[in-house]
């Protein structure tokens, strides 16, 4: 139940050429408290509920618990979610022995593209593709829970 992942900005759309899948994700939050974020997500044809804990000092590791739920339940829970939602396409790109999940946001977060890679330890090495930009692991404004409240379109450029 420990999630270890690094998050990066993406500097080109070259990842699309190597993507093995593309899935639409719509999600909302029942709770955006950083101590225990509760997310409801529809990913393709499946529903999920996820609880995430506060990140450690590096922002790379945190508690995560997720369960699949029915689409009907996910749609009902999204109706009572906090204001603000996330709409994005997720591309999965295999690089070496890792899979990068690249999220291309729409709606109020259009123009933002971030990539995440899950690791087995904070020290694990991984191959960095050419389209990977600045690391933003632990930078809370890039958390989906924060993007739902303070969307990318409102950031100063």
Image (cartoon, grey):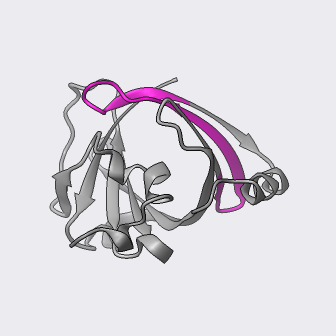
Give the residue displayed 42% in from the left and 60% down from the top: 150
State yes or no: residue 101 in magenta: no
Front-most of residues 90 and 56? 56
Query: Percent x, y for residue 112?
Result: 34, 68
Give the residue displayed 34% in from the left and 52% down from the top: 141
Q: Which residues are magenta?
A: 41-64
Query: Percent x, y for residue 89?
Result: 49, 68
Instruction: Say if 88 sits above or below 142 in the image.
Output: below
In the rendered structure, the answer to whether residue 94 lies left or right of residue 78 reads: left
Front-most of residues 130 and 81? 81
Front-most of residues 42 and 28? 28
Give the residue displayed 33% in from the left and 24% down from the top: 56
The answer to whether residue 106 is visible is no
Query: Percent x, y for residue 143?
Result: 40, 49
State yes or no: residue 59 in magenta: yes
Q: Residue 83 appears in which quarter of the rendering?
A: bottom right
Looking at the image, how many numbered discs can be counted on the residues? 0
Front-most of residues 17 and 6? 6
Q: Label the magenta part by its dominant secondary structure.
A: strand
Query: Percent x, y for residue 125?
Result: 19, 33
Give the residue displayed 58% in from the left and 62% down from the top: 85
In the rendered structure, the answer to whether residue 117 lies left or right of residue 156 reads: right
Instruction: Say if 76 sits above or below 123 in the image.
Output: below
Instruction: Say if 97 sits above or below 123 in the image.
Output: below
The answer to whether residue 64 is visible is yes
Q: Quadrant of the C terminus?
A: bottom left
């Amino acid at each position: 139940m420990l999630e270890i992942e690094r998050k990066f900005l993406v500097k080109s759309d070259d990842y699309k050429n190597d993507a093995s899948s593309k899935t639409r994700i719509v999600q909302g939050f029942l709770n955006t408290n950083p101590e225990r974020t509760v997310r409801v997500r529809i990913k393709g044809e499946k529903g999920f509920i996820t609880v995430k804990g506060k990140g450690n000092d590096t922002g790379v590791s945190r508690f995560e618990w997720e369960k699949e739920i029915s689409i009907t339940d996910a749609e009902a829970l999204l109706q009572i979610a906090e204001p603000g939602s996330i709409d994005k396409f997720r591309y999965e790109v295999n690089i070496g022995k890792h899979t990068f999940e690249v999220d291309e946001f729409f709606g109020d977060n259009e123009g933002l593209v971030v990539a995440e890679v899950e690791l087995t330890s904070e020290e694990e090495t991984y191959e960095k593709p050419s389209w990977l930009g600045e690391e933003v692991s632990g930078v809370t404004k890039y958390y989906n829970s924060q993007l739902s409240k303070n969307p990318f379109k409102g950031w100063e450029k």
